[in-house]
Image: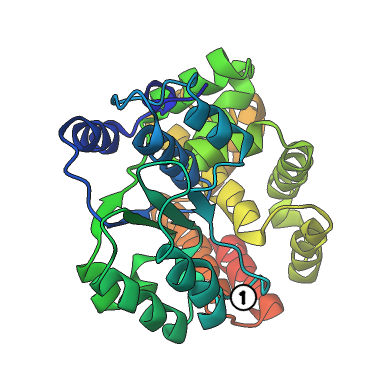
Amino acid sequence: MAGFNDIYGQDAMKEYMENVLETRQISHAYIIAGEKSSGKEFIARIFARALQCEKGGTQPCGECHSCRQALSGNHPDIIRVMHEKPGSIGVEDIRSQVNNDIVIKPYYGPYKIYLINEGEKMTVQAQNALLKTLEEPPAYGIILILTANVGALLPTIQSRCVKLEMKPVRDDIVRRYLMEELKVPDYKANVCVAFARGNIGRAKLLASSEDFDRVKEEAVTLLKYIHELESAEIVAAIKKISEYKLDVTDYLDLISIWYRDVLLFKATNDANPLIFREEIKYIRKEADRTSYEGLETILDGVEKAKQRLAANVNFDLTMQLMCMTIQEN
């Protein structure tokens, strides 16, 4: 059964939670912040199980009735707040599942613990409703708000919670996890590590994704011949990735990794540290063709494309601007 020892790279958060469990100085509300797939819910569930564990240690024992119930997803006092609308958590969701429920004492455990995943999706009305509970919580009530965007939470919510932040996991730890735990070969682990940028959950998803392998191959093929294609052909190739279960910004990340490899090879003339070192023939060609300033401009152009897409700028226009930047440099 998973415990704090199974969490990779979040030592400060683990140490804090274990200290809370040892001293029993437990807050009524926590915000666990970190990007998507970083492991927020995994950690929150371990913390919740440990809080409810009948043995009362710094780890969930996995053997008591409470731990077995939690592992099966049937613990009556660990409540995962659900919402019907995928894009928002509404005021009625909070009122019915938290405010009206928390007044009822725990059925079995010492606490009633509420997990609000994607907390950034709470509407302002929902947050104000939750605020009423946070201002006067019962002694047994604990609310865990998991969010990829702390800034979307009202300052009044933030001020009443202990804030815990997921940190990027070191590349060597992510690589070891992929290769030792998931048996991912080194050449694939290297791409996933570079792509995940310290997000171990994202690295795990990519390592097990057939779509990712296909998209990577398509991206590499495009980049090999990008200077021989028309802008419209490049935009069409990028658009094609909508067929896969991968976000277009993931595709742009692959482009960034490629040009970082080109920049690194240009500076060192060493293929060994490259992520795409099996494509050294094409990376060498691009390094000879493009100046340092040009490569920096391209990388900046890819980042600007991601920012524009996040701001809902027209897709075709955004891609055309990025393609022009690549081809002109």
Q: Amino acid at mark 1?
A: Thr
* Above-or-below relation of 241 to 93: above
Residue shown at 61% from the left, 70% from the top = 324
Quarter occupied by residue 229: bottom right
Query: Residue 177 at what x, y percent from top left?
Result: 50, 21
Foreground residue among 270 and 255: 255
Badge 1 element: helix
Residue shown at 77% from the left, 43% from the top = 211
Label 1 crowd (10 A; few <14 / some 14-19 / many >=20)? many
Residue shown at 49% from the left, 73% from the top = 94
197 left or right of 83?
left
Query: Residue 283 at what x, y percent from top left?
Result: 59, 36
Query: Residue 2 at what x, y percent from top left?
Result: 49, 25
Furthest toward the bottom, the residue is 125
Q: Residue tagged by mark 1?
A: 318
Residue shown at 31% from the left, 53% from the top = 140
* Above-or-below relation of 107 to 229: above
Note whether residue 270 is visible: yes
Note whether residue 284 is visible: no
